[in-house]
Image: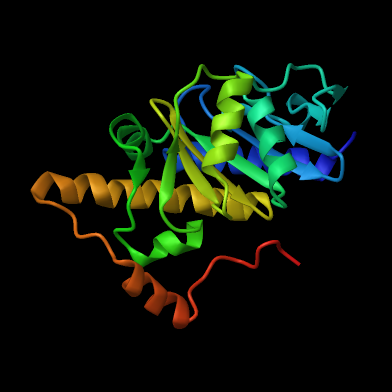
Amino acid sequence: MLLEDERAALCAIGRRCAEAGLVTGASGNLSIRVGDLVAVTPGGMMLDRMEPADCPVVTMDGRLAEGERAPSSETPMHLALYEATPERAVVHTHSTYGAVVATTMTELPPIHYNTLLLGGVVRVADYATYGTPELAENVRAAMEGGKRAALMANHGGVALGRDLDEAFENARLLEWLCGVYVRAKAIGEPRVLTEAELLAVLERGLAPPEWPPV
């Protein structure tokens, strides 16, 4: 079976996404790239109920290389991100606080220095119908400049990583940051870190992994 270990990893991370509340029902999708092949979660299936054989493998131009199930409808977005970045894993979620921010704002401001781990201010990609080339392009644009996460207007979030574990942790961090902002907004106007304050954090050594990774 092509990419057997990677397909098993999709199942493991899919269960973790469900347990962490990052997805509900059959929402959300994951993928991992190895060379010119991408293992991706199937469309219309709950992430915590997948088996490795359920996860199809596609080529970088979107052709099915192996698998009985159809790839996720968001596969074009995953492929666009792999074309545009050196990252090797994508986690797309429908988490609650991420969706709240994505329906009300154009970006998530840096309310905590850990925003730097995602590349700084998190952009909200313009809305487009799910699964379309337009959405794929909007998300790709929102990731420009070394971003490792973005929100999708009226939809959800997407995070990148050098492997699935890292992409999952970036997705969890994105949801935590959104949650802090939403809760802070409920009791007052959140204080946003300045560029100078963020630079001071960078000078102390907190930074995203090398871009591109070595």
Q: Quadrant of residue 82?
A: top right
Residue 133 visible? The answer is yes
Q: Quadrant of residue 40?
A: top right
| 95 and 25: which is toward the camera | 95
Q: Is residue 57 rendered to the left or right of residue 79?
A: right
Q: Quadrant of residue 22?
A: top left
Residue 210 screen position, x and y as percent: 65, 68
**Residue at point 55%, 65% (across, down):** 208
Picture quarter with the N terminus: top right
Picture quarter with the C terminus: bottom right
Residue 55 screen position, x and y as percent: 74, 28
| Outermost residue toward the bottom in this view | 204
Residue 119 screen position, x and y as percent: 50, 58
Residue 46 visible? The answer is no
| 167 and 203: which is toward the camera | 203
| 132 and 145: which is toward the camera | 145
**Residue at point 48%, 74% (across, down):** 206
Residue 71 screen position, x and y as percent: 72, 22
| Outermost residue toward the left in this view | 187
Task: Give the vertical position of 165 relative to 205 (above or below).
Answer: above
Number of marks: 0
Figure coloring: rainbow
**Residue at point 76%, 38% (across, down):** 7
**Residue at point 87%, 40% (across, down):** 36
Q: Is residue 153 rendered to the left or right of residue 35?
A: left
Task: Give the vertical position of 211 relative to 64 (above or below).
Answer: below
